[in-house]
Image (tube, rainbow, N blue to C red):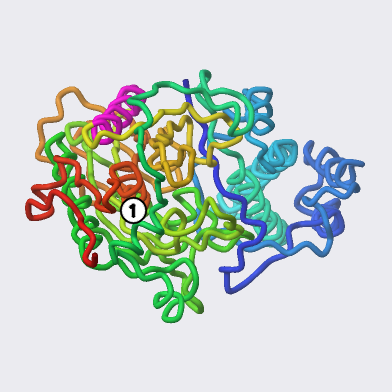
Amino acid sequence: MMMISSGTAFRTLRLAPSFFKPPTLQTLTRTLSRHRHGPLRGSPLLPSLLRAVSSPALQSSSPAVEEDKVVAKPQWKAAIDFKWIRENKDLVAANIRNRNSSADLELVLELYEKYLALQKEVERLRAERNSVANKMKGKLEPSVRQALVEEGKNLKEGLVALEEDLVQLTDRLQQEAQSIPNISHPDVPIGGEESSAVKKMVGSRPEFSFTTRDHLQIGKDLDLFDFDAASEVSGSKFYYLKNEAVLLEMGLVNWALSEATKRGFTPLTTPEIVRSSVVEKCGFQPRGQNTQVYSIEDTDQCLIGTAEIPVGGIHMDSILPDSALPLKYVAFSHCFRTEAGAAGTATRGLYRVHQFSKVEMFIFCRPENSNMYHEELIQIEEDLFTSLGLHFKTLDMATGDLGAPAYRKFDVEAWMPGLGRFGEISSASNCTDYQSRRLGIRFRPSSLDTSPTNLKKGKGGNSSAPTQFVHTLNATACAVPRMIVCLLENFQQEDGSVVIPEPLRPFMGGLQVISPKFK
C-alpha cells in the first residue's frame, strides 16, 4: 500500500526572514479580472477560476482566505502524494480523527484543486506565448508583427501574475499538507493511551522483605546524584551523576552499543546541534507551542532531543543503491528536551530531565521489509531488558499516542518499585516513508546492482529503474536515566546496597555491587 507523506504543522513557525500573504479573494479576483480582455480572453478556465475564488466556501472564516493571515514561507518541501490523498480521502480523514490531529484535510483538498486549475492555466499561457514567439520568427507585415508583439507582451504580463499566484498557492498547499500525519497500521488500536494493547509481559515484580526506597533516596544514601548543585548551576531537572553512577552510565552505553553492534548495527556518534529544517523533516516542532525542542536564538539550529534526528539526516537528499539496504545504525548522543508541561511526583528525579544520554537504533530499508525490521527492533529491545532481569511489558500504542511520523509504535514499560508503577523505558517506531519523503532519501531498485556501496548524494548505481523512497525505523536501545532508575529500584538490597546485573559488570570494571560508603 502506498503511504502518504505528511508532517508537522507550521502555523507557529517563526523561522523565515520574510513572509507573504496568501492569495485572497480580492487579489486573485483582481489578477484574473485584469485578463478578461487580455491574454486570458477566451480561456475556458477563466469563468471557473473566477467562480472558485468567489465561492461561499472562500468567503467563510476558512484560514485559506483570511485577508490578514500571514504564514511563513516553507523552507523546504516534502514529496507529498496529493493524488493519493485525494483518492483515499475517507481513509485519510478517519486517520486524522483517530490521531486527534488538527490537520485540515478539506482545506488541503480545496487548495490542491485550485493548484491544479491554476497550474493548467499557467501551462496554457506558456504554450500560447511560445506559439506567438514562433509566429514572429518568419517574415511578417509590420502591422502583423506589431500585433504579435502586443499579444506577446500581454501574455507575458498575465503569465508573470499567475506564476506569482501559483508560487504562493503551492507554498500554502505544502504548509497545510505537511500537518497531515502518517497513515496508521491497520492493527493499531484506536483511541487514547489507555487503549494501547499489551503485546507481551516479561518477568514478574520483584518481592522485597523490607521497605523499598525510590531511586532518589537510594541515590542520596549511596552518594550517586546531586540535584541541588545542578539546580543552582543549570536549573531544575538537571543533575550531577557521581561515583558509581558515572560508571553505571558509561557501562550502560557501552553495553548497549556492544549488543547492537553484534547484531549488525554500525556505531555512530552524532552532532548534537542540527538545523531546524532537519528537525522539522523528521516530524518534530522546533518552534511550535509546547515544543520539546531547545532552539538556539538567532540561528536556524536546535539541540537534538534524540539521535533519531541527526541519523535520519545522514543520507538526506541521497539516492542509495539497492545493495546498500538495509542500513542499520546505532548512535550514542546526549539529548535535550524542554519537557514543557511536565510536573508531578511521577516526574521527579531522573525519570524526566532536560539532558540525558541515550543509545538509539535506526534503520533505512526497502518498503516491503519495514514491518519485519520493526519486529526485529522490538525483539532486540526485549532481549536487552530481559538479560538485565527487568519486569516489563511491551505495548502496541494506540492512535492517539502516535507521533505524526509513526505508522506503528511499540513502547516498553518497565516496573519501577519506587514509583509503584510501570514507566516507559523504550519505544520502537516504523515511520514508513514519512521521513524519507521529507528528507529526500530514496533508493534505486536493481536486482543486478553489484556496484560498491556509494552513499554520496545523487548516486545510486547505474540501474534505470525508477527510484523509491526508503522506509525509516527507530528504536531506543538504552535511555540512560530511566535505566538507572530501574536498576537502582529493582536491585536494591536490605543493607542499602544495589546489585549490578551480570551483563553490565564487564563494562563497569567488574563491579558487582554498589555499597554504602558510610556506616
337 to the left or right of 27: left
> Where 41 sits versus 232, above or below?
above
Q: Residue at x 81, y 56 (%)?
A: 24
Q: Residue at x 40, y 75 (%)?
A: 230
162 to the left or right of 77: right
Q: Which residues are magenta?
A: 367-386
Q: Nearer the viewer, residue 347 or 3?
A: 347
Q: Is residue 318 visible?
A: no
Give the overall secondary structure of the magenta segment.
helix
The residue identified by callout 1 is 307
Q: Residue at x 29, y 38 (%)?
A: 363
Q: Nearer the viewer, residue 106 or 96?
A: 96
> Where 494 sits versus 444, above or below?
below
Q: Residue at x 76, y 57 (%)?
A: 23
Instruction: Examine the structure image and report whether residue 129 is included in the region drawn in magenta.
Output: no
461 to the left or right of 161: left
Counting from the top left corner in percent of width and height, residue 276 is at: 46, 63
15 to the left or right of 387: right
- Among the 4 quarters of the image, the one containing residue 98: top right
The number of numbered badges drawn on the structure is 1
SS state under label 1 = loop
Counting from the top left corner in percent of width and height, residue 262 is at: 12, 37
Q: Is residue 407 visible?
A: yes
Q: Nearer the viewer, residue 363 or 392?
A: 392
